[in-house]
Image (spheres, rainbow, N blue to C red):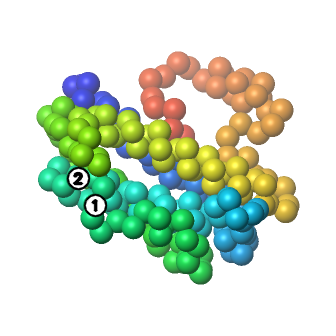
Amino acid sequence: MDMNQAFLETAEKQFLYYKRLGERAMEQLETEQLFQTWNEDTNSIAVIVKHLWGNMRSRWTDVLTTDGEKPWRERDAEFVGDFHTREELLAKWEEGWDCLLGALRSFTPDHMSQIIYIRNEGHTIMEAIMRQLAHYPYHVGQIVHTAKMLKETSWDSLSIPRNGSNTYNEGKFLKPKTRKHFTEDELE
């Protein structure tokens, strides 16, 4: 397989993994907890989702022909908590991810070295994807951490449960060696 094609497939799996991680964290909360902040210097999960939505739409709309920082983007407004329902929050979450995944799925291996711009700074498509593969999981991590702090009942682990490493590893090593992406079990 072409290395650029392999990169595109791996990037999509990684993005889908983090999307699902954020969803599994939010599913564990009561609706009002999605809008809760600790103090005026922290963001609610809803605000983090709003920022991701704004960033994804700006970066990935017409990515091959326009700067990734769109003139219509109002980044500062992304940090104002004006989502009011779980449904509204989840609709924006899906809209942002759909924009990203649509752009990603439109790329061919030949696109990987094409230069695009974010705030007038040139990136290859591959560099732009890598930039966002660092940015989006950073914020999904914030969502997960905040959700764990807010959850008032027991937390359903999103990865290997605490004190469960040996059991997890034993299960892995009982299976024959295979070549697959580590996210495949999670995304099935």
Q: Residue at x 58, y 54 (%)?
A: 22
Q: Amino acid at mark 2?
A: Asp
**Do callouts 1 and 2 mark residues in contact (Cβ within 8 Å)?**
yes
Q: Residue at x 18, y 55 (%)?
A: 66
Mark 2: few/some/many CA within 10 Å (<14, 14-19, 20+): many
Q: Which mark is residue 70?
A: 1
- Label 2 sits on a secondary structure element that is loop
In this picture, residue 70 sits left or right of residue 29: left
- Label 1 sits on a secondary structure element that is loop
> Which image quarter: residue 62?
bottom left
Marker count (numbered): 2
Q: Is residue 2 above or below residue 122?
A: above
Q: Is residue 49 above or below residue 182?
A: below
Residue 176: x, y in percent? 56, 20
Q: Check disc 2 and report the residue beneath it.
A: 67
Confirm whether residue 88 shows in the render: yes
> Which image quarter: residue 46?
bottom right
Q: Residue at x 71, y 57 (%)?
A: 147
Q: Residue furthest bottom?
A: 84
> CA–CA distance between discs 1 and 2?
6 Å
Residue 123: x, y in percent? 26, 37
Rendered-image quadrant of the N terminus:
top left
Q: Residue at x 29, y 49 (%)?
A: 119
| Of the pair 148 and 63, the residue shown nearer to us | 63
Q: Amino acid at mark 1?
A: Lys
